[in-house]
Amino acid sequence: GEALVQRARLETGLSAARLTGEVARTTGQLRMFAEVLGEGSWHGARIDPAQPDRAPQPRVDIRQRRIPLGPVAVFGASNFPLAFSVLGGDTASALAAGCPVVVKAHEAHLGTSELAARAIRAAIADTGLPEGVFSLLVGAGHDTGTRLVTDPRIQAVGFTGSRRAGRALVRAAAERPVPIPVYAEMSSVNPVVLLPGALAERPEELADAFAESLVLGAGQFCTNPGLVLAVEGDGFDAFAARAAGAIDGNAGGTMLTTGIAESYRRETEAVGARPGVRVLARGAQPDTASAGRSLLMAVDGDDFRADPELQREMFGAASLLIRCRDLKHVTEVLEALEGQLTATVHTADTDLDAARALLPVLERRAGRVLFNGWPTGVEVGHAMVHGGPYPATSDARTTSVGSLAIERFLRPVAYQNVPDALLPPPLQDANPYRIPRRIDGRLDLG
């Protein structure tokens, strides 16, 4: 583990503490999927026993389970060299589903990718699995990725990265003679709503926590709080002043690559030049080629709604405060948003009615709705959803984090009147695996 952390630190500029945490997250999600396999409900076993005496028509015996899709292509992310890369959640969930995996290594951490791949290959050898269960592919440029996705042997794709690259892979997969699903996590600005009671009660506390979340890891998180919405007034002004002070005093950080740093500069300049946008604070400019300078901007709600370009992800420590006239205006701005990974609401006891009215709007626009917290940090568990409506992801029905991620790489098969001796074990009458099954509509825990 130490060699992996040190190599990742050299390649990415991330701290040893952050990377050590990633090791724990990575091994934790592998253990979680091992538990999922042992528990067995992932088989999706359903049995409708035959009813030969049913009138007017007898019912045949039908049984259903889920099987692996086949080989999966995984594209490692730049910002998590372990937890969303070679050993990340896409790889873990695909392997758990029984699918061979081919990982396209990210150019930002090729050495880390090789070390992780060696660990996987060693585990494969130790457990006697076929060598072809896992492969690592290294190649520069988009052509390598396109060739991988269009290879007829690949049956599904897991991707974390930019909207442009994700859309290109979706398009390539759809244009194959036999199209395949692409589960792409692509773009999100993760709106945060500060309701009036919360702003009146704790504006400075909220501002400090917001700034801390924004600059964490130089802002290179897909759940970075890129938009903050609130009703104008003394609370909004106090929040904005305190947040601007925190950003103004921020020393900045080293971004993952010079290319990411340059893209961040271009995106922030483009947003800052849009009509109605005002710069509230800029952090210090580090003296490095991959420097990331934190930035806080503001815009009125009507200007934001009129300009779709203000919804672009800046992927760094930059955020836009949106000043709204009233709660109705807040709702109108939210309804104009694209799909998001997260939506956050900060409340006080006096805000519950307003929050209740917002929930249906937020549910339609985000995969995760959280209250009185900050979106950076994604718990790995059974109830987590790390996904959302387009363009947050290419398929809003699923998640790339948590045990539900395994379902992306499975498909159902029904077996009609198949003799018990020929049925796969999860569907046999004796239930030799002792797994949960739904029999005639009722859940049997095995």
Image (cartoon, grey):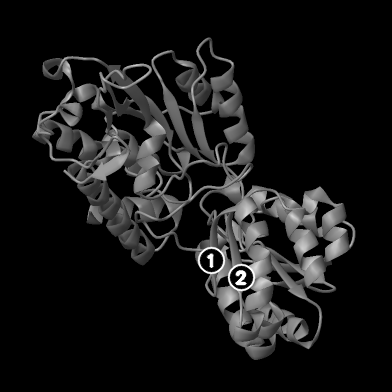
**Label 2, label 1: how many angstroms apart (C-alpha)?**
6 Å
In percent of the image, x 20 and y 33: which residue is there? 121
Q: Position of residue 401 (x, y in %)?
A: 41, 49
- In this view of the protein, can residue 266 be seen by the observer? yes
- Direction from residue 382 to residue 373 in the image, left or right: right
Across and down, in percent, residue 255 comes to 54, 56
Which of the two residues, 48 or 374, is positioned nearer the viewer here?
Answer: 48
Q: Where is the N terminus found, in terms of image quarters?
A: bottom left
Q: Which mark is residue 424?
A: none
Q: Does the rendering let one see residue 279? A: no
Mark 2, secondary structure of its residue: strand
Give how far across and how far down residue 196 sits, in percent.
Answer: 71, 81
Image side of residue 301 versus residue 133, left or right: right
Q: How many marks?
A: 2
Name the quadrant containing residue 429.
top left
In the rendering, which numbered label is found on residue 370?
1
Mark 2: which amino acid?
A: Val
Residue under numbered circle 2: 345
Q: Element type at marker 1?
A: strand
The correct choice, above or below, for 201 with respect to 407 in the image is below
Q: Which amino acid does label 1 sit on?
A: Leu
The crowding category of the residue bearing disc 1, from other C-alpha atoms within 10 Å (few below 14, some 14 to 19, many at least 20), is some
